[in-house]
Amino acid sequence: MTNTSTPIIEFKNVGLSYDDDEILKNIDLELEAGKFYTLLGPSGSGKTTILNIISGQLKVTHGDILFEGNVINDVPVEKRRMNTVFQDYGLFPNMNVFDNVAFGPSIKGLSKKEIKNKVTEMLSLVKLSQYADREITELSGGQRQRVAIARALANDPDVLLLDEPLSALDYKLRKEMQYELREIQQRLGITFVFVTHDQEEALAMSDWIYVMNDGVIQQNGSPEDIYDEPINHFVADFIGESNILDGIMKADYLVHFTGKDFENVDAGMRPNERVEVVLRPEDLDLTTIDNGKLVVTIDDQSFRGDYYEITAIDDDGNEWQVQATNKSKIGERVGLTFDPEDIHIMRFNESENDFDARLERYEDDVDDAKK
Amino acid sequence: MSKKFRWANIYLWFVFILLYLPIFFLIVYSFNSGSVMQGWSGFSLKHYNELFSDTRILEILVNTFLIALLSSLLASIIGTGGALYIYNLKHTLSKNVFLSLNNILLVSPDVIIGASFLILFTVMGFALGFTSVLLSHIAFSIPIVVLMVLPRLQEMNQSLVAAAKDLGANNWQMLSRVILPVISPGILAGFFMAFTYSLDDFAVTFFVTGNGFTTLSVEVYSRARQGVSLEINALSALMFMVSLLLVLAYYVISTRAVRSKKRGTRLVLPATEGL
């Protein structure tokens, strides 16, 4: 992200510890205005902690939080121009839908007419215009979710924070809400920071993803970058299905794994450097033994609706996950094939900066070679 | 009806009859034309007439209700504040200390509380009378209110507080618009409990009434010592009716909120369902 304008939210070396327990370790991040950001990670990775620090519910142990370039470490929750959609929604049970949404505007001291306009606008945004007079207890989970979003947006925040808001919904409703949230974000043009442990959700909705684990940002990038070029074992494993194998980079564009050499598209490592090799199940194809780059035995398969998930074992004993459109026979020996660009190489302990630098370096090489 | 059910019913009726028989006996004899509880000599309202012409007892009645109303109102306010304070304590130890101190007052004998108030008021040179009774009633009612309100606070969803702050509310707005309405059933229950406790309290009141001022229970006690007049029966019958009405009132108030909400949505439903 090369942007000269001030980020709307910036973390500078932010850390948080309880006693000796380090929850967040030296977090740096920059969020641009108007984008959809996702903090993705397993539970306990620190993603919600980051959200609570942005909203002001938590104070940091060290580091600075900046809002449009100004340090806001000591600005209380109620003074920040951000609002939160809580995981359990936190709707006020003593108020109906209208009064819940009207809470923020009425605290601000808007006139009755302005409040009514605002609430009407917000309820129509979340498609609940007909439900203004309903009690919260009379709503379904999906409708409560919408009220929570409308209530948070009624305050005209610059940043909307969403704490796993879709986790309580069923699959179909969740898909629908993903689409709608994305649409609302694009319509309003404000910044969304979305916390989730669901990688599918993150990939579907975000402009930019921060992958978290153990209180550290593992990788950040566009959904495509994160999926196609995971930086380490954790990211490759957490985002999507992966076959991860140990390998050796014999030279630029030549990798050795499962006892064979394969042509690939990565470069810039030391000769004979030990690496990890990632191959996505959907990039693998089953073919005849003669056409295959590897020979595998089908071990197991399960029907997934739009594809068969196949587990196969190669002659080295490695397990392979393959997504195939055709049914296979268990116990059958078949060929396994993939393209050189499907092989993704991960170096051990390579930081994001190193990774980017290496990428630039060898892409320059390629450009030079072309000239 | 199964056999098991019938046994249960018989037992229930037995217990209720056992509990209500003395009161029923008392009420029936309040209509006796004779002046003693032995032997029924015919129906009469004369004891009620006596009661209503007894200005002393009517004055005491007003005092008793005034004390009950004022003490339970003030105790509700103070007790709710106390419950909020205990709820907001971060330290588990101090929380438990406060809660135990609260509960000790609930279980300690009224005689001890009454005696200690008497000693306190005497040492302070505080004149016994209306104020001393009111103060002691407030004091023993506060723990009741705390005990009724605190569970409501603990049940309350934590993110309501976070959401109110998040939407820009200051502490007062958060309290008045979110927390108090949410815990109001607990406050109401506490108020009614405190009201009935104050109304029928004898032991504590007995110690702190002093000369000239008295409440109903103390008056009934002192009259009963001089031989039971059936006027007391009439009074007891009326008091019993008042208690019954209080219970009904509490029931109506606590269910009305729910019912009116449902009625409201029923009005909305036909309009929205069609769209």
Image (tube, rainbow, N blue to C red):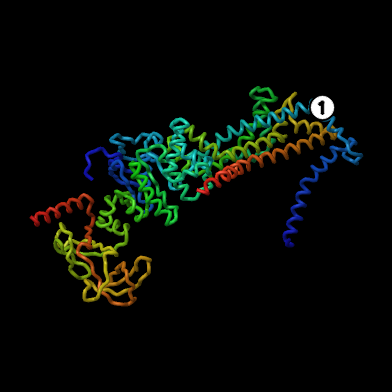
Local SS, label 1: loop
Residue A101: x percent and y percent?
46, 39
Q: Quick one: which residue is furthest to the right in this view?
A: B41
Identify the image quadrant of residue B39. Answer: top right
Q: Can residue B57 be seen in this view?
A: yes
Q: Quick one: which residue is furthest to the left in this view?
A: A371
User: Which one is in front, B178 or B77?
Assistant: B178
Please report the residue visible at 32 percent of the width from the left and 52 percent of the height from the top: A213
User: Which one is in front, B10 or A138?
Assistant: A138
Q: Which amino acid does label 1 sit on?
A: Asp
Residue B56: x percent and y percent?
79, 26
Q: How many labels does the image show?
A: 1
Horizontal side of residue B135 vs A84, given as left or right: right
Name the quarter where the C terminus of chain A is drawn.
Answer: bottom left
Residue A9: x percent and y percent?
30, 40
Please report the residue visible at 44 percent of the width from the left and 44 percent of the height from the top: A148
Q: Mark 1 points at which residue?
A: B54
Residue A210: x percent and y percent?
30, 49
As drawn, B215 above or below B20: above
Q: Is residue A315 visible?
A: no
Identify the image quadrant of residue A370. Answer: bottom left
User: Which one is in front, A76 or A59?
Assistant: A76
Please report the residue visible at 31 percent of the width from the left and 42 percent of the height from the top: A34
Q: Quick one: which residue is furthest to the bottom in this view?
A: A332
